[in-house]
Image (tube, grey):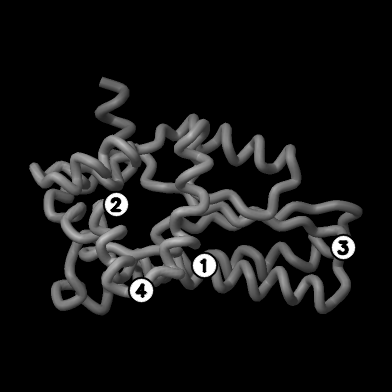
Amino acid sequence: MGRSLENLTPEQIQQTFAVNTLAHFWTVKAALPSMKKAPEALLVTLSSVMGMTSSAGLTDYCASKAAVIAFHEALRLELWHDNIKTIRTLLVCPAAVDTGMFAGVLAADDWALKISRFFIPLLSEFEVVDTIYRSIQRGDELLVSCFSGWRGIALSWAPTISRALPVPLYDSVVRLGGGLNGMDTFIGKNYDQVKKEKAN
């Protein structure tokens, strides 16, 4: 993550897919038989808004999150095909969360990135947990962006609507969202580093 396709090693690509995509397969495959026997169950799949749109410097991440969306949709259809009505599903596609994983993104002094930072700030962990909890309580099947207020309304539709645009216009919209230069200043930190920094 944070590298162009040419600069990614095969091991880095495999690791991204192992964590972001294949983990869903193995976890759900192990839990599904028990879930089918339960009187009521909920399957929450965590992807990313980057699985619905893309960004330069995130080929592995975006592809792995897009695969998670396809996994979730295919699984939901399999449950319908098998007439399983006791398992509810929720697909969650948050925007970037301030865990340190995306440290340095959108930091360049570029006019498009300044616009992006205003409209799409990093989410706090609390905001994400809160919106997921509220979506579960409402019985939602899809949660996009995890923002509340006007951002939640606008950004939940933006990835889908932008896909209907001609490619040059879509690319311009993605640039405004930070998808062209947003990763140029990427530093990134693992979660353990961030926890240590917050504790000090």
Residue at image position (56%, 65%) is 24
The x, y position of residue 103, in whole percent, is 23, 42
Name the residue tied to disc 3: 85
State how far apart marks 2 and 3 are (Cα).
38 Å
Residue at image position (48%, 72%) is 67
State how far apart marks 3 and 1 are (Cα).
22 Å
Q: Residues within 10 Å of mark 1 (few under 14, many from 20)?
A: many
Q: Which label's residue is closer to the chain start, 4 or 1?
A: 1
Q: Which label's residue is closer to the chain start, 2 or 3?
A: 3
In-front residue for pair 148/122:
148
Q: Which mark is residue 166?
A: 4
Query: Marks 2 and 1: CB-CB under 8 Å?
Result: no
Query: Marks 4 and 2: CB-CB under 8 Å?
Result: no
In-front residue for pair 38/55:
55
Q: Which label's residue is closer to the chain start, 4 or 3?
A: 3
Can residue 196 be seen at all in this image of the molecule? yes
Amino acid type shown at disc 2: Gly
Q: Which mark is residue 68?
A: 1
Q: Which mark is residue 177?
A: 2
Can residue 19 be seen at all in this image of the molecule? no
